[in-house]
Amino acid sequence: MTATCSEISHKLSDDRSDLTEPLYVETNLGNNEVFCCPASPTTVPARTPQTLESPAPRTGPPRRRQRTTSVNNQTTTANPSECVIRSNNRTIYTAGRPPWYNCAGQQVEPFVIGICGGSASGKTTVAQKIIESLDVPWVTLLSMDCFYKVLNEKQHEQSLINEYNFDHPDAFDMDLLLEVLLKLKEGRKVEVPVYNFITHSRETNTKTMYGANVIIFEGILVFHSPEILKLLDMKIFVDTDPDIRLARRLKRDISQRGRDLNGVLKQYLNMVKPSYANYIAPTMAHADIIVPRGGENKVAIHLIVQHVHTQLQLRGFKLREALANSYNDQPRPESLHLLPATPQIKGLHTFIRCKNTSRDEFIFYSKRLIRLVIEYALSLFPFKATTVETPQGVLYEGKRMATSKICGVSILRAGETMEQAICDVCKDIRIGKILIQTNKETEEPELYYLRLPKDIREYKVILMDATVATGAAAMMAIRVLLDHDVKEENIILASLLMAEIGVHSIAYAFPKVKIVTSAIDPEINDRFYVIPGIGNFGDRYFGTEPSDIFN
Ligand SMILES: Nc1ncnc2c1ncn2[C@@H]1O[C@H](COP(=O)(O)OP(=O)(O)O)[C@@H](O)[C@H]1O
Ligand SMILES: Nc1ccn([C@@H]2O[C@H](COP(=O)(O)O)[C@@H](O)[C@H]2O)c(=O)n1
């Protein structure tokens, strides 16, 4: 069951959770707004298939919001006026992160584009045009400039008189660069140095970046290292006339990089020009696409964008639809723990499934059922033998739970209805929350808000959602927990009602996650509601108007 931001906003201030480190990078987009960006690569939203051979006009859904991070460049694709995102260090908001994994729950690698070319050829401009035209919500722009080596005293003196060669491959920290790119490709968090062209040095602060759907990596020697070349899915060389490059460079270095005319010319003639001939121009041979005239070349940018879309589609999207159409007719998984269908449980289900049940009664009987589900989930944790003495002075061979490190995480909004039950049975339990909402255009789950107990990796987690249909939202929540280093075998998904398909989706993707539910329904409808089902659990429990939100 998923919810809107506004529906849960009133609850966020009074929960009991300790907070976690951000899953999402906070990036300063040059306007002092703090935005959170993705932790790891993802699939793209639905769009009309397009190919390089036959570019199709744009017919897909309306343009999506874009979130773009960059370091040392001025990319500010994110619109600061759009929702949420201001974050303290521990509460994470996003503008709606679509799945970053496939049906098997595995992370999908981002598409990495390398853009190489001479200084001031228009690499950054081309990157920005690609990002604008791509219309994919999660793009990371990384500049090679961030990886200039820290200079020693002598080198620094040389740099001040334009005698240090910043255009030689040795000027870059290639090891760090490779490490960062590898991590980004794996969807992991990286700290990227921030470079200052005026002082020729690294700033003391770094920028946190994560992988994304697409990573664009630009710089003068992007094609120099064979190891880095191997990481690039698409190689673009921006080929701009040297006179134009010199003219642009003069203008830019004097206005933005604190240089004077003579200094720029001296550096250009002695270092930039020969290095271009020796190290940069020869790497053009590695390019898949050579773009003359840089950002002006609309045809080239269009072709590049079409190709990236095609590649992203091949990496998989339409997760919910794919889940809804898979894993039929399979034996029930071993990880499933279905409460026995006793008359008592059937009776409770009869109350909550009946459309004429009043809200009061719905809440009352739901609470009873929730309590049973939570108790059952707790019984799956390890217990150890313990002997106690009774008031009669006789020994009793009992059991105690072998761990005290248990926390509850609810998938907002409906999962929140299960929090009270877990708090009632586990003293001082910590509670986390994950808000996942379905995008009405793409029908994909999107992650909006995250607040998890600190050190959650050390905990056994009961993940709570009232109903599970395709399993798409639950899968996203499980993926979030795994990304926070919670062990798969330490997660129990507790739900009142699941669709058969949801059980299989989750068991297939995460076989070690235990699934606890009080009933399994055979079908889901074309809107992904469980059939026969309960209706919209959140609306019935909270007494809200029926919403368009998927179950
Ligand atoms: N097509 C263009 N026409 C005019 N100026 C441009 C064009 N492309 C880039 N520039 C300017 O040239 C400078 C260098 O461009 P940039 O894209 O940053 O190049 P690079 O990243 O290759 O150094 C910038 O000041 C930019 O505004
Ligand atoms: N301290 C520095 C470092 C680098 N440069 C020059 O920057 C150029 C690369 O940046 P682009 O944005 O033009 O690709 C490179 O040609 C270096 O000469 C510098 O001047 N000072």
Image (spheres, rainbow, N blue to C red):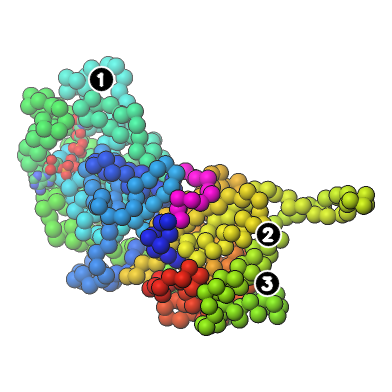
Q: How far separated are the C-alphas under marks 2 and 3?
A: 13 Å
Say which of 105 and 64 sits in front. 64
Give coordinates of residue 63: x percent, y percent.
24, 64
Q: Tell whether 315 sits left or right of 125.
A: right
| Number of numbered discs | 3
Residue neighbourhood size for the residue with mark 1, other residues' Cα within 10 Å, grouped as few (<14), some (14–19), many (≥20)? some
In the drawing, what numbered circle is on residue 156? 1
Query: Helix, strand, or loop for circle 3?
Result: loop
Give coordinates of residue 196: x percent, y percent.
25, 30
> Which residue: 27% across, 40% down?
32
> Looking at the image, in which quadrant does ligand 2 appear?
top left
Query: Helix, strand, or loop for circle 1?
Result: helix
Asked whether mark 3 lies closer than 8 Å to ligand 1, one says: no
Main secondary structure along the magenta-highlighted residues: loop
Q: Earlier in the sequence, mark 3 or mark 1?
A: 1
Residue neighbourhood size for the residue with mark 3, other residues' Cα within 10 Å, grouped as few (<14), some (14–19), many (≥20)? some
The residue mark sitting in front, 1 or 2, is: 2
Q: How far separated are the C-alphas under marks 3 and 1?
A: 71 Å
In the drawing, what numbered circle is on residue 339? 3
Q: Amino acid at mark 2?
A: Leu
Q: Tell whether 362 sits left or right of 300.
A: right
Q: Are marks 2 and 3 in contact (CB under 8 Å)?
A: no
Q: Amino acid at mark 1?
A: His
Say which of 425 and 152 sits in front. 425
Q: Earlier in the sequence, mark 2 or mark 3?
A: 3
> Which residue: 19% across, 71% down?
57
In the drawing, what numbered circle is on residue 378? 2
Q: Amino acid at mark 3?
A: Leu
Residue neighbourhood size for the residue with mark 2, other residues' Cα within 10 Å, grouped as few (<14), some (14–19), many (≥20)? many
Say which of 274 and 467 sits in front. 467
